[in-house]
Structures are given as structure tokens and as C-alpha cells.
Image (spheres, helix red, strand yellow):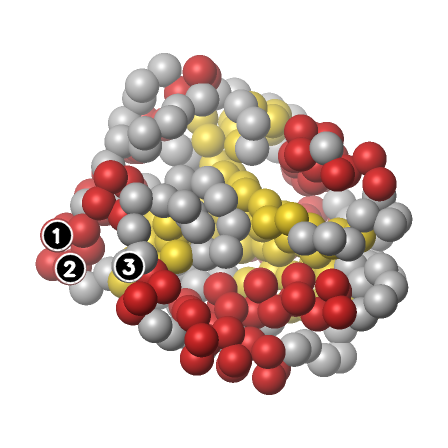
Amino acid sequence: MLLLDLTLPTPAENLALDEALLEEAEAAGRPLETLRLWEPSHLFVVVGRSSQRAQEVRLEACREAGVAVLRRASGGAAVVVGPGCLMYTAVLSYQLRPALRAVDHAHRFVLERIARSLRRLVPSVRRCGISDLALDDRKFSGNSMRTKRTHFLYHGTLLYDFPLRWADRLLNTPPRQPTYRRRRSHGQFLINLPLSLTPLRAALIEAWPISGPRRDWPRQDTLRLVAERYGRREWHEVR
């Protein structure tokens, strides 16, 4: 697995790069696994591929605050991201990890790997619900996936210094909730990890069998996906 430490200038480019990495792996004809780390430079909302924007997002509040609402290629509910939220993307091979074709196994594999590494620094980290990481019963990481024929993409958020008030301001109560949430508001449910960025990044990297840095990335495919999808209102506002 190679490490790509890269944040692109715009939200659209960053979302497009995640999908481009998955497309690249599919076209490679061999296992091509990548761990990408990035952090947004400004606030925006990301909804899941099948999300109903008006159901999950306070669109008028986003407009008033000048916060863009974008759509990702994977499933799951809406999230607010920005500075203080470390993002990761893992592109993983089914050939190397055939058991992960079962979606529940994939969630467990990725999240337990990350949780074990973080527990060396914060012992109360645990996996909760289907795709969350939490401190005791408060969530600091939401995750989602996109599957293809030979590889799948698993990506998520890690809150460490994020202004949590934005979640209540910009998001509605999600239509589907894990049992452990107990109908709490975003502000009551979310929490920042008590870590600074440097040890958090190190723990995330140590969770994976990194063999070295990536020297390149799929620039042209990223630009194509921005032009075809992530840079177009039709994609983000389809639902």
C-alpha cells in the first residue's frame, strides 16, 4: 500500500480525486492499494450518493453562511467537514482481501484497524454502529464506502479540532440513526478526538502496511471527473 498525502485546492477536486483513485485501481489489472490523507481548507457539506439534500441539510442556512453542499460517490448521510477534520481514503483490493466482499466484514476490517492504532493514544476509542468510531458513546468519525469489481473505496472523517456547532447549524437530524445515538442532537452526539494533527496522522498511517509514498496521482482523471460530475450543479443537486 502506498501513501498519498495530498489536499487539492477545491472541495470538488478533492472529492473527484477519491473516485479517480478507485477508477485507477480498477483499470490497473493488478492490486493497487492507496491510503490518502487530506484536510479541507474551508468548511463545506458533503451528502451521500443517494442522499436527499433537503431532508438531510439545512440548505437555507448553508446559503446564508456561504457553505457549499456537494455530493460524494459513496453512500451514507450528510457530514460537515473543514479545518480540524482529517480526511482519509483507503482504496483496497478484493484480490488481496477476498473476505471484504462482505460489506459488514469490510466495515469491521477498516474501522477496527484504525481503532486499534488510535487506542494506543486514546484508550476509549471504539467502533460503534455500522460505520462509526466513537469515544465512549460520542462519535468522532463517520465512514462510507463505494464498491467496484476488483477494488473498493473506504473513506471517512476524523474530528480533532473541528467547530462542532456547525453540525447543528447546517445539518438536519439524520433520517437514519444508530441505536447508540439515542436521538441526541449533533452537538450532543459529536466530539473531537483529544489529539493534535501530528499524532493523529501518525496513528492513521501506522494502522496500514505502508510500503512508501506515492510519487504520482491520477491528475487527468481527477480533472475529467470535476468536469463531468463534481464541478457541475446537476450532480450535486440531483436529489
- Pick whichever of labels 3 and 1 is earlier in the sequence: 1
Q: Residues within 10 Å of mark 2 (few under 14, many from 20)?
A: few
- For the N terminus, the quadrant is bottom right
For badge 1, the amino acid type reads: Glu
Look at the numbered discs 3 and 1 and tell me whether their residues touch, using CB distance below 8 Å.
no
> Helix or strand or loop: what does disc 2 sit on?
helix
Q: Which residue is mark 3?
A: 237
Determine whether label 3 and label 2 are within 8 Å by CB: no
Picture residue at 75% right of the left edge, 79% below the top:
215
Q: Which residue is mark 1?
A: 60
Give neighbour class at mark 3: few <14, some 14-19, many 20+ (Cα, 10 Å).
some
Marks 3/2: CA–CA distance: 14 Å
Q: Is residue 67 left or right of residue 152?
A: left
Task: State yes or no: discs 2 and 1 in contact (Cβ < 8 Å).
Answer: yes
Residue matched to label 2: 63
Residue type at mark 3 is Glu
